[in-house]
DNA sequence: ACAAGTCGGTTGTTTTTACAACGAAAAGAG
DNA sequence: CTCTTTTCGTTGTAAAAACAACCGACTTGT
């Protein structure tokens, strides 16, 4: 547990909280650790969750497969990011999506009730975490709206362009590496892989961009 | 201001807070009231927002128009619902969407910093509002994921079916009234209106559903 | 009551996407 | 190192959506 404290310190949830303070909060928040093999389910659609979780190692996808086998990747969780924040409320109901480890991963679980119930004395740094949690959920919210922006575009080309230019902006560079392979990108943008691959190559041939595997450059 | 207190009492933000307590919190949270005519912009893409807002009368759409005139309706805000919760963090940046009044509307603005900064003494009921705000943002998050589920469906028919069956479930009835006209529904689901209208009629002819204007019945 | 505007359905054409199938290249396993 | 699996581009075809245009019914404002 201890060895992940430096990682926790760099997360949004524990921003501006010192390692000593984090250490003392771990038990206060009933922190638990669990590891998952690549391909293993962390949570399944239909389950209930009473925790906020932070990924401290590996990579996760939040996704959903429908009856016809179409997979939709709702979100990608990188080290230091949270998930489960949509199920904070006691009456939230069951999970709508699966959470799956796309790499060997380690997840830390925190009792959500202990975070959002403001304890008057116990932890001096609690209020900072409360505020951090607000900012984190709020930002997640904004990211979801942004993703809605991508996939509400009518054509595959527009979806690709809005996603790729956002990534370029985020990296402050026209060259960047995306965290998806082709199939995953297609599942993320909700389009057919081969059609998307086709469109990407057309865009390359038209001189709009260059790419080599996951490395892209907008022109 | 006073006359909206009974409405505020029924909102998620002020759940379990008495009218007297709300009344005393209004100044504490620097509440302000503003009215808008039908069609008027409440907020515009690119503006900055330092408040949490609650709609106390009318109806709003959160939407975005692109260069080609295509409108995407991201969300619909009904009386008692909040918006702006995605911009709580000071570094949130500019609004990504427009907020427009689709009916004559009245909006109440609250200073967000005063909500999330836990004041040790001032308001006894502050902590309840903090918790309510957590639940509200969290639920909004879940709703966004749900909407992602609708529009990530590949075909117009699937988009319609997932949206309509969710509405049926939400109303606990196979008969229900949707809050959109055809153009708005198309903008909400990110499809072409005429194609959607066509598909709706096909589905009706196949015996999947019945409808009359905004009243639908799943069969 | 009348004119102007909105709304929803319909149709035909063009463009785009989904789907299926295949092969080459790269990555991974033993 | 070789065999297997995965990944990605490519192609052709069938299906679906976008687009444009039109009409009739219904609203709204004057």
Image (spheres, coloured by chain):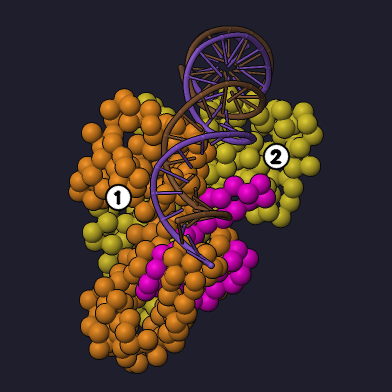
Chain colours: A yellow, B orange, C brown, D purple
| Label 2: how many Cα within 10 Å (few below 14, some 14–19, many 20+) | some
Q: Work out which quarter of the rendered image holds the N terminus of chain B and state it.
A: bottom left
Q: Relative to the observer, which residue lies in front, D22 or D20?
A: D22
Tell me the magenta residue range: B43-72
Q: Looking at the image, can residue A34 be seen?
A: no
- Element at badge 2? strand
Based on the displayed image, in which of its 4 quarters is residue B44 positioned? bottom right
Q: Is residue C22 left or right of residue B110?
A: right
Q: Looking at the image, can residue B135 be seen?
A: yes
Percent from the top left, x then y, of residue D13?
Answer: 56, 9
Membership of B77 in magenta stretch:
no
Q: What residue is pinned by disc 2?
A: A216
The residue sitting at 56% across, 45% down in the picture is A150
Look at discs 2 and 1 and give the one toward the viewer: 1
Q: Work out which quarter of the rendered image holds the C terminus of chain B and state it.
A: top left
The residue sitting at 59% across, 26% down in the picture is A195
User: Exactly how many numbered labels are in the figure?
Assistant: 2
- Element at badge 1? strand
| Above or below, B18 relative to A192 | below
Percent from the top left, x then y, of residue A147?
Answer: 52, 49
Which numbered dot is residue A206? none
Marks 2/1: CA distance? Answer: 46 Å
Membership of B53 in magenta stretch:
yes
Of all chains, the one bearing label 1 is B
Percent from the top left, x then y, of residue C8?
Answer: 42, 41
Of all chains, the one bearing label 2 is A
- Residues at circles 2 and 1 in contact by the CB criterion of under 8 Å: no
Q: Relative to the observer, which residue lies in front, A90 or D17?
A: D17
| Label 1: how many Cα within 10 Å (few below 14, some 14–19, many 20+) | some
Q: Relative to the observer, which residue lies in front, C5 or B124?
A: C5
Q: What residue is pinned by disc 1?
A: B177
């Amino acid at each position: 547990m201890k060895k992940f404290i430096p990682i926790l310190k760099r997360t949004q949830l524990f921003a501006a909280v010192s390692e000593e303070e984090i250490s003392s909060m771990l038990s206060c928040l009933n922190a638990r650790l669990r590891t998952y093999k690549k391909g293993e389910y962390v949570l399944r659609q239909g389950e209930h969750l009473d925790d906020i979780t932070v990924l401290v190692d590996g990579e996760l996808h939040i996704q959903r497969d429908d009856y016809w086998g179409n997979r939709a990747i709702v979100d990608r969780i990188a080290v230091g990011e949270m998930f489960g924040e949509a199920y904070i409320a006691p009456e939230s109901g069951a999970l709508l999506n699966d959470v799956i480890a796309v790499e060997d991963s380690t997840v830390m679980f925190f009792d959500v009730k202990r975070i959002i119930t403001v304890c008057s004395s116990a932890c001096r740094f609690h209020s900072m975490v409360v505020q951090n949690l607000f900012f984190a959920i709020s930002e997640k919210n904004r990211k979801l709206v942004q993703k809605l922006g991508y996939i509400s575009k009518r054509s595959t080309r527009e979806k690709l362009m809005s996603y790729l230019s956002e990534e370029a902006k985020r990296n402050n560079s026209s060259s960047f590496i995306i965290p998806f392979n082709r199939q995953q990108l297609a599942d993320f943008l909700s389009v057919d892989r081969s059609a998307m691959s086709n469109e990407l190559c057309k865009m390359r041939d038209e001189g709009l961009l260059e790419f080599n595997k996951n490395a892209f450059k907008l022109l």
